């Protein structure tokens, strides 16, 4: 998935940036503050995303697609979208860029907004904070400053409340990604923490007035809104799954830390060796001086003691971010469930 | 000449091949013939003078011959060498030459050689093709011969002018010579024959002559090469015969010979022997002293051309007197050829057999017979020089017969002592007054025979009728071993007895004793059978036999290896007959498990076989855990086939070279000793299932649970990966399907998967007591299913009646009670028994799935925090280090 994103991102971006000069001109251009303060999604887009997942996504598999829209002041309006076709092994030569171009051209013919403003992706139990996502979002944001990624969580949606979130990379993270330097020092300098990797952009779902009218009408006609998923008391499965995933991440985190630990130990060991070597050299030089001989030539210490490769810290950051997301999820979920349980208890007491 | 040589590489290579043979063979043959000539012409008064001349000339002719051969194959280097030798030989013969004049053949070769060299020299193209050595040799030789020939100029010109005449002269002279010797045209005339051939050459032009010679050679070799060289009768006389045939153009003789060679070897031998007989008839009329001389001659001949040896026994067949000494001497002579290159082993065996016949005809006594028999068997073993190849069936039969005869003699004559340690000198073969003493070890022969038998079995396709035929010999082998055992029990040392006992054990341990088994079954009913009856059967009961033999070895053996083998076989035998406790105790007491890895591979294979048999035995007894433990090592490696010596793995074929593979092949266990690998795997998997499924159910949510059997899990995973699950086909699939059923506590399905027609045919019917095993298995499945059920579903129940359980699993109440009690005691099941109502009351103290997860998470987080802290510690340490090192670093910069 990652490679696909990385491959296509810049290409599509460059193609659209030319045609979308008008939209871009309105953007603030400079890094500083975030370019987008709000995301306004058309109802059509939401339904299309949900439909896409239901048709093609299943289990841990994710579906992805392109978002189209406009930038209006500091508001990003997403007015349409189309999915990426699902890949199989045998059509590896399928040209994605070509497909996207074709698609956008076709949409333009029917007078639909054809400006590339981001992409969407489904997720499995909220596990979306990955390297692949980071990379592709980076390339998007690099090319089109306003682009966002919409994360659609079908499982939460199935539980009764639509879960759709828009994320952007923070300017700090953008800087770091541009440098492509994920060493501990660089991250420290960029003062990146897992909390400051992604920023969530508030979403507003907006429908046209005609649709709103239709909705009103429909609501009146249907007797009871089918909302009982929301009240489902069965919680163990979801919680268990999330816990399991959380545990996996914690394991990874542990490993990463161990790795980092080894690195630290190695560096300090080498530091000591270097130090000893210098001292020895110094003593020898002193002796030579006393004997009237010229001092030994200075040697390149960095060649003698190659510092160990520092492990990339980006992964651990991502893992931390993912853990954070899981924890948020669990917190949210358990809070809701507790509420439900109390309600159920009250209900039972009332009945009996 | 050049035309011939450029005709084609094919004929060239061929001629070079035959040329090589010609170069080597005749030389040896002629050297051997030399003294014979002497002895035959001894009546001649001029003997000394003549022989001196002959000797020198012989030498020269030999050299000349070699040169001619070298010329034929264009080996100039060889020519040069031989030419130098020739010069020296001529120098030696100078005195004779002075007397007799320069021999014609000498002149001829000089002339021919010069012509030949000139020709080569002019042939630019051929010269280019020559290799460096040859080219160099050519130029040196050319110069040398020019210089040398200056001395003989007159002779050579003379010869060139009138080559035929001089050749004729020579031939005549030689013919006279050959007539002088009785029938020497076969033996002593190579020189004459050679020269005669030349006289036949129609023109004196050497070039043409050579060509003709080539052609003739070609022809004769083409037709004869295959038969003649390959039959191993490349004797010197056949050589000369050949040439004779050529030169006299006696086609009839040639033809007569051809069919003979086409017939099989024996016929040829016979013919030759007949010829030899005639010769020896004549000879035997001569005086005793002559015989002595003759023998000297014979000895020489043996050295030269070995096949001549075969003419010898006949020499005595009609001899005036055949004594022990003579026969022994003959025997030794034959044996001397043994192991030498070019010795025809088949004929050797035949010779020895003839000798034994002669000995018996002449009543030389058993001592000699035994002595020769020993040697026959030894040479039978020697017949195949290669360790990997095995005896031919007829040889094998011969060998068995021979050993049997030998045993007959030994049993019939208790006063014969046979032993390895008896020295040749102290042998007593004929003095009847004293006990006969013969050197030789019957035990070694029998051991070797047993090995040969194994080899035959290894090399026969186990699925063929042939294998069955060979297997029938096993009884014979056993009988022989038994006889040797009886013999050695009387006469042998303890060490020998141990060895023969081990052989006996090795032929007994793997056989299931059906008779004893039957007897055991009938014993409870007919317990009134008298002890006498028991004693009668004792001889047949292999258990008692094993017991007796092994105990003897345990007590008396001093070599570790025999004892180890005996113990392993004993355990195997116990296990095979379901005497689990004896087998196990013996295994544990012997402490073999600790140091078996130091043993040699065959013993290790035996150990593996024993462990497997032990595991299968435990399984039959219903001891799944023991069975699993015993089989774990063998099965977990996935190389059971290799470890049991029942076949080579294809996978590791690249890793070993040819040599290793041969060694490994030799280690293979013959097919009739094999342990069924499918049975083995099934037993292992089923016992793993019975252990693992309840364990898995009990530790469902335990993060630290370990697999009991990796292989079983592997099979389960393979089963899960299947996209479509049809009804099970293979044994493994059956077990996997059964495991799945058991996981749900569904013992009936599990039972139907494990025990059904297919599995019966594949596995269970292979056991001697199949029904017993099956009932055991059903019960085991019921019990373990019950346990699994309780583990899996206890969280669902508040309480459960034992009666229900006993109905569900068709177990009687006490059994259910005992199983549940055991589980409660082992703290596997958090419950208590309510006696009055016969129910199990669950305590529900087990954490739920979520709780379990939370616990695990807490644990993991704990370790995470720990790791994190370590990083932090490190940071602090390194920081402090940096600060302390800073002041040290500063003055350095100043320097």
Image: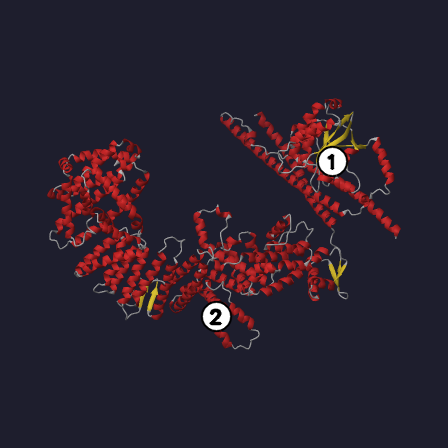
| Residue B274 in which image quadrant | bottom left
Residue B33 % position (x, y): 21, 51
| Residue A165 in which image quadrant | top right
Q: In this figure, which residue is indicated by the disc labeled 2?
A: B540
| B854 is higher (above) or lower (below) than B607 | above
Q: Residue at x 56, y 25 (%)?
A: B895
Q: How is the image coloured?
A: secondary structure
Residue B189 % position (x, y): 19, 49
| Residue B741 in which image quadrant | bottom right
Query: Does residue B19 appear in the picture of this structure?
Result: yes
Residue B145 % position (x, y): 20, 35
Secondary structure under badge 1? Answer: strand
The residue lying toward the viewer, choosing from B225 and B149, is B225
Residue A157 % position (x, y): 77, 40
Name the disc covering residue B548, or none.
none
Image check: B397 left or right of B323? Answer: right
Q: Real-space Cα distance between discs 2 and 1? A: 84 Å
Label 2 crowd bin: few (<14), some (14–19), many (20+), radius 10 Å? few
Q: Chain of mark 2?
A: B
Q: Are marks 2 and 1 on the same chain?
A: no
Image check: B405 left or right of A84? Answer: left
Q: In this figure, which residue is indicated by the disc labeled 1?
A: A151
């Amino acid at each position: 998935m990652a490679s696909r994103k990385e491959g296509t991102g810049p290409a599509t971006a460059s193609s659209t940036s030319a045609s979308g000069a008008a939209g871009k001109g309105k953007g603030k251009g400079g890094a500083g503050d975030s370019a987008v303060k709000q995301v306004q999604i058309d109802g059509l887009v939401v339904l299309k995303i949900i439909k896409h997942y239901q048709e093609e996504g299943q289990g841990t598999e994710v579906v992805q697609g392109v978002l189209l829209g406009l930038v209006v002041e500091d508001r990003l309006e997403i007015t349409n979208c189309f999915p990426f076709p699902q890949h199989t092994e045998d059509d590896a030569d399928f040209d994605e860029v070509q497909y996207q171009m074709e698609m956008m051209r076709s949409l333009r013919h029917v007078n639909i907004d054809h400006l590339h403003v981001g992409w969407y992706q489904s997720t499995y139990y909220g596990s979306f904070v990955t390297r692949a996502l980071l990379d592709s979002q980076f390339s998007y944001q690099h090319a089109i400053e306003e682009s966002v990624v919409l994360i659609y969580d079908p499982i939460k949606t199935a539980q009764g409340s639509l879960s759709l979130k828009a994320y952007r990379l923070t300017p700090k993270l953008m800087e770091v990604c541009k440098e492509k330097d994920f060493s501990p020092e660089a991250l420290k300098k960029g003062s990146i923490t897992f909390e400051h990797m992604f920023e969530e952009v508030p979403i507003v779902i907006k429908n046209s007035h005609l649709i709103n009218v239709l909705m009103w009408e429909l609501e009146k006609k249907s007797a009871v809104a089918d909302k009982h998923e929301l009240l489902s008391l069965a919680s163990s499965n979801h919680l268990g799954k999330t816990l399991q995933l959380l545990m996996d991440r914690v394991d990874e985190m542990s490993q990463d830390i161990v790795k980092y630990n080894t690195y630290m130990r190695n560096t300090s060991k080498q530091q000591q060796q270097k130090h000893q070597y210098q001292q020895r050299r110094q003593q020898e030089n002193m002796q030579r001086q006393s004997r009237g001989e010229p001092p030994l030539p200075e040697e390149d210490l960095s060649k003698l003691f190659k510092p160990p490769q520092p492990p990339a810290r980006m992964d651990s950051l991502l893992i931390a971010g993912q853990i954070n997301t899981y924890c948020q999820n669990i917190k949210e979920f358990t809070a809701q469930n507790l509420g439900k349980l109390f309600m159920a208890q009250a209900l039972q007491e009332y009945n009996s | 000449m050049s035309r011939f040589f450029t005709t084609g590489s094919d004929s060239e290579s061929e001629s070079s091949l035959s040329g090589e043979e010609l170069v080597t063979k005749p030389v040896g043959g002629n050297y051997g013939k030399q003294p014979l000539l002497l002895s035959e012409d001894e009546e001649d008064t001029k003997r000394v003078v003549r022989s001196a001349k002959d000797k020198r000339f012989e030498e020269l002719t030999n050299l000349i011959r070699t040169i001619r051969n070298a010329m034929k194959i264009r080996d100039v280097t060889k020519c040069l060498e031989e030419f130098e030798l020739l010069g020296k030989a001529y120098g030696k013969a100078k005195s004779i030459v002075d007397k007799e004049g320069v021999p014609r053949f000498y002149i001829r070769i000089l002339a021919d050689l010069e012509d030949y060299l000139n020709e080569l020299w002019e042939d630019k193209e051929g010269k280019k093709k020559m290799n460096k050595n040859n080219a160099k040799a050519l130029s040196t030789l050319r110069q040398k011969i020019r210089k040398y020939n200056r001395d003989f100029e007159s002779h050579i010109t003379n010869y060139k002018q009138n080559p035929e005449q001089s050749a004729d002269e020579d031939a005549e002279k030689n013919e006279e010579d050959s007539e002088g010797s009785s029938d020497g045209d076969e033996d002593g005339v190579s020189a004459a024959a050679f020269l005669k051939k030349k006289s036949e050459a129609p023109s004196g032009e050497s070039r043409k002559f050579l060509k003709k010679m080539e052609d003739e050679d070609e022809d004769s070799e083409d037709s004869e090469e295959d038969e003649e060289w390959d039959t191993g009768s490349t004797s010197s006389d056949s050589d000369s015969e050949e040439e004779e045939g050529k030169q006299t153009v006696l086609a009839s003789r040639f033809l007569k010979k051809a069919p003979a060679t086409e017939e099989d070897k024996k016929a040829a031998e016979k013919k030759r022997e007949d010829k030899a007989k005639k010769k020896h008839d004549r000879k035997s009329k001569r005086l005793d002293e002559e015989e002595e001389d003759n023998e000297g001659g014979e000895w020489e001949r043996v050295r030269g051309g070995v096949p001549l040896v075969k003419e010898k026994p006949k020499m005595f067949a009609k001899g005036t007197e055949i004594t022990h000494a003579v026969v022994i001497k003959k025997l030794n002579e034959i044996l001397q050829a043994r192991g030498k290159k070019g010795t025809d082993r088949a004929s050797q065996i035949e010779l020895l057999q003839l000798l034994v016949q002669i000995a018996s005809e002449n009543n030389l006594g058993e001592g000699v017979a035994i002595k020769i028999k020993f040697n026959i068997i030894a040479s039978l073993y020697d017949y195949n020089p290669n360790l990997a190849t095995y005896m031919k069936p007829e040889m094998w039969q011969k060998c068995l017969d021979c050993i049997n005869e030998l045993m007959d003699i030994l049993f019939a004559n208790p006063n014969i002592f046979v032993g390895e340690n008896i020295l040749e000198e102290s042998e007593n073969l004929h003095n009847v007054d004293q006990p006969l003493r013969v050197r030789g070890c019957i035990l070694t022969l029998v051991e070797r025979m047993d090995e040969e038998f194994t080899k035959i079995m290894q090399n026969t396709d186990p699925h063929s009728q042939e294998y069955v035929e060979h297997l029938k010999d096993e009884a014979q082998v056993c009988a022989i071993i038994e006889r040797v055992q009886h013999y050695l029990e009387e006469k042998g040392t303890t060490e020998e007895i141990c060895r023969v006992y081990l052989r006996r054990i090795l032929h007994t341990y793997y056989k299931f004793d059906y008779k004893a088994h039957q007897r055991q079954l009938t014993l409870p009913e007919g317990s009134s059978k008298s002890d006498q009856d028991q004693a009668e059967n004792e001889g047949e009961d292999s258990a008692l036999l094993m017991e007796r033999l092994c105990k003897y070895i345990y007590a008396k053996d001093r070599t570790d290896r025999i004892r180890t083998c005996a113990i392993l076989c004993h355990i195997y035998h116990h296990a095979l007959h379901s005497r689990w406790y004896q087998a196990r105790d013996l295994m544990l007491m012997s402490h073999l498990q600790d140091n078996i890895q130091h043993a040699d591979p065959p013993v290790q294979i035996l150990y593996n076989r024993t462990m497997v048999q032990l595991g299968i035995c435990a399984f039959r007894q219903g001891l799944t855990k023991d069975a699993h433990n015993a089989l774990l090592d063998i099965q977990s490696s996935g190389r059971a086939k290799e470890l049991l010596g029942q076949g080579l793995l294809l996978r590791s074929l690249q890793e070993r070279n040819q040599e290793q593979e041969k060694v490994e092949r030799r280690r293979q266990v013959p097919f009739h000793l094999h342990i069924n690998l499918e049975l083995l795997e099934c037993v292992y998997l089923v016992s793993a299932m019975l252990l693992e499924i309840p364990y898995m159910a009990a530790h469902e949510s335990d993060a630290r649970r370990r697999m009991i059997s990796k292989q079983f899990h592997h099979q389960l995973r393979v089963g899960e990966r299947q996209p479509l699950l049809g009804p099970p086909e293979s044994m493994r699939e059956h077990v996997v399907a059964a495991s799945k059923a058991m996981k749900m506590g569904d013992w009936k399905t599990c039972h139907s998967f494990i025990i059904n027609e297919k599995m019966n045919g594949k596995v269970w019917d292979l056991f001697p007591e199949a029904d017993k095993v099956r009932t055991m298995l059903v019960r085991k499945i019921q019990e373990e299913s019950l346990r699994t059920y309780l583990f899996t579903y206890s969280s669902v129940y508040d309480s459960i009646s034992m009666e229900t359980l006993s109905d569900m699993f068709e177990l009687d109440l006490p059994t259910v009670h005992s199983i549940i009690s055991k589980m409660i005691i082992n703290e596997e099941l958090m419950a208590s028994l309510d006696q009055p109502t016969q129910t199990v009351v669950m305590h529900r103290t087990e954490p739920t799935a979520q709780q379990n997860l939370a616990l695990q998470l807490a644990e993991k987080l704990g370790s995470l925090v720990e790791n994190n802290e370590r990083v932090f510690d490190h940071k602090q340490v390194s920081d402090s280090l940096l600060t302390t090192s800073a002041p040290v670093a500063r003055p350095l910069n100043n320097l």
